[in-house]
Image (spheres, rainbow, N blue to C red):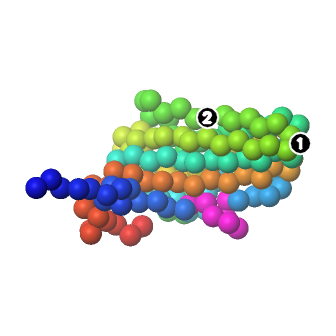
Amino acid sequence: MAVTRKMADDVRVETVVTQGGFNYTNAAAAQAYDTGVFLDMREYAEGVGIFKMDSHGATDTIQCDIIQATSAAGAGAKALTGAGYAATTIAAAAGTGACAAVKFHSNMLDVDGGFRYVGCRATPSGTAGHRISAHLVRMACHHAAASMPSA
């Protein structure tokens, strides 16, 4: 008999950036916005940051990065720089929106330096007044669904 696996067996969706958290309605240009909570990747093999921007000025861009830290509070936060990692820049014309997904793997973290937590960073440019948001999804848990970590 074949064993059927469900998406919930391998994926845990974490809303790191939520309404009132990292959903800014009047974001200033050239200022970095980081998640307030960083998620532990110790039990997960990969993840993806999902970013959205609505532009209220002329054509604007947003730099979308995954950042790593040594604690859930974001201590020592720095850019992810592992082999194969690439940040993404999205652009939106006035009155429109744009989305991007930035994929990463846990082996891109500086674990020797104590970095095992990840978060999202968005840095808009152009005109002030962006609406930006981001979410983080951790995937490929090393445990079966019944024993998945809760955070």
Tell me the crowding category of disc 1: few under 14, some 14 to 19, or many 20 or more residues within 10 angstroms, Cα based.
some
Residue at 82% x, 36% y: name it.
93
Q: Residue furthest left?
A: 1
- Name the N-terminal-most of marks 2 and 1: 1
Which x, y percent locates residue 63? 68, 38
Q: State the image quarter where residue 43 is shown.
A: bottom left
Residue at 41% x, 60% y: name it.
12
Where 78 sits versus 71, above or below?
above
Q: Is residue 1 magenta?
A: no
Judged by its main secondary structure, the magenta piece is loop
Residue at 89% x, 42% y: name it.
57
Where 66 sits versus 18, above or below?
above
- The residue under label 1 is which amino acid type? Gly
* SS assignment at label 1: loop
Residue at 42% x, 67% y: name it.
151
Q: Which residue is mark 1?
A: 57
Tell me where the magenta segment starts and ends, as one range. 16-22
Which x, y percent locates residue 18? 63, 64
Q: Which residue is mark 2?
A: 88
Q: Is residue 44 visible?
A: no
Tell me the crowding category of disc 2: few under 14, some 14 to 19, or many 20 or more residues within 10 angstroms, Cα based.
some
Which x, y percent locates residue 45? 34, 47
Q: State the image quarter where residue 106 is shown.
A: top left
Where 68 sits versus 92, above or below?
below
